Image: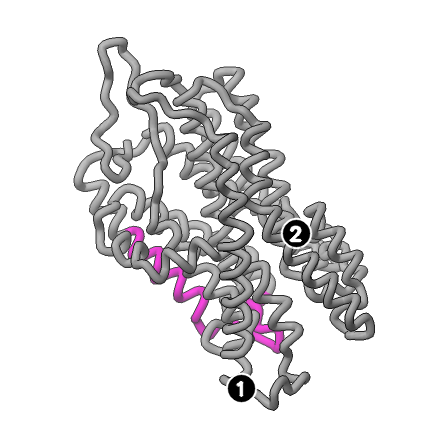
Amino acid sequence: MVRAAGDTAPSTGENGSARAFRLGARPPLDGVRAIAIVAVMAFHAELSQAPGGFLGVDVFFVLSGFLITALLVEERQTTGRLHLGHFYARRGLRLLPALLILLAALGLYALLDPHHPEVQTYWRDALSSLFYVQNWVAAAGEFQIRLLAHTWSLSIEEQFYLLWPLVLLLLLRRRVRPAITIAVALGGVLASAAARYLLLHQEPVHLQRVFNGLDTRGGALMTGCVLGLLVGWRLLPTGRWFRQAAAVGGAVGLLALLWAMLGPRYDGAARILHPGRFYEEGLPLVAVATGLIILSVVVAHDGLLARVLALAPLVWIGRVSYGLYLWHYPIDRIIHPDAHTFGLSGAGLQLLRLAATLAVVTLSFYLAERPVLRYKSRFEFRRPTQETAGYVQP
């Protein structure tokens, strides 16, 4: 079993019910987000120091799977039910405001400069991003996606949000044993790996399909789900030895993740691993490494890794990481080296891109996103005063 920050071991009250799991605020997880977004931004900025920065997307996937599953388990234990309508309302309030602002701003840019090469397919791309099907558009490989090419990963996450809570709700309503539920999640991990393997070993190999498919990239999300179930149901040991092992595992996971992102093992102009190695070795490595980091900061919450990841700058970057992901790519495409913006190049141009991204993201977060997030409280499940109240065995 796992002890959360400030928690004691699961107890049993006079009525025989155990204390419900509570995720609570976890600043180190914002630090994990910070690592992921910095890596992705460095890759899109074509920095040679981060040839594997694109793997940061899979860090986001694992973290999303963990957080969503842990929160759903907490709601079930606390209230005895899962209110999926409220879940989707919370997701919409978190994701849509920033996306709509981005689409509106880029739409205005497309109207003002309709002949710019980057906006030739903008309206089609905007619709596929808004309805979260950009990954399948990219998987088809029939169109060139420009300013919104990066929204493929947002589409995968949203499709996951639609499917996994429904599956979990069905399993819980049927009172399926925790071991079987975890086996289902593990089956999702293995099924994703199998889908990648089969598609990579057919002729001709369609890499865009493998790279962008929910089935082929969902393994990282389901890895997070497995961890969320284990943590939420307190199925992990609580002893000091386990906390120490988790701390060591988190350090190893972080080193492996940095090695994958920064290591000089990438070939070609696209700076991408050989397809077989990337899909069959790279993705599982990142998923496991990220899982070890998450487990470490949840279990060994007072350990060195957790304290480092909870540093204020990392936490802030993590909290605005969604906006950074949305805005950095189109800004990089618009402020392109070929445009010779203000006569800048090299480091000067990169600093201009970064400054523009940070300025826009800060305004969006504090003036639009955060005010809208206040309405999430209307859809939050209520936690009883006494922790034993409302607990439901898994």
Figure colour scheme: one colour
Q: Quadrant of residue 49?
A: bottom left
* Quarter in which the C terminus is drawn: top left
Residue at image point 43% right, 20% down: 79
Q: Helix or strand or loop: what does disc 1 sit on? A: helix
Q: Is residue 360 magenta?
A: no
**Residue 214 shows up from this direction:** yes
Q: Position of residue 111 (x, y in %)?
A: 79, 66
- In magenta, the rendered stretch is 249-274
Task: Between residue 277 and residue 123, name the one nearer to us.
Answer: 123
> Disc 2 residue type?
Leu
Residue 115 falls left or right of residue 251: right
Q: What residue sits right under mark 2 in the picture?
A: 100
In the rendered view, tell whether residue 307 sits above or below residue 64.
below
- Residue 287, position as x, y percentages in the image: 46, 51
Q: Secondary structure at mark 2?
A: helix
Residue at the (42%, 60%) spot, across then down = 317
In percent of width and height, residue 383 lies at 38, 25
- In the image, what residue occupies the spot 44% across and 17% down? 80
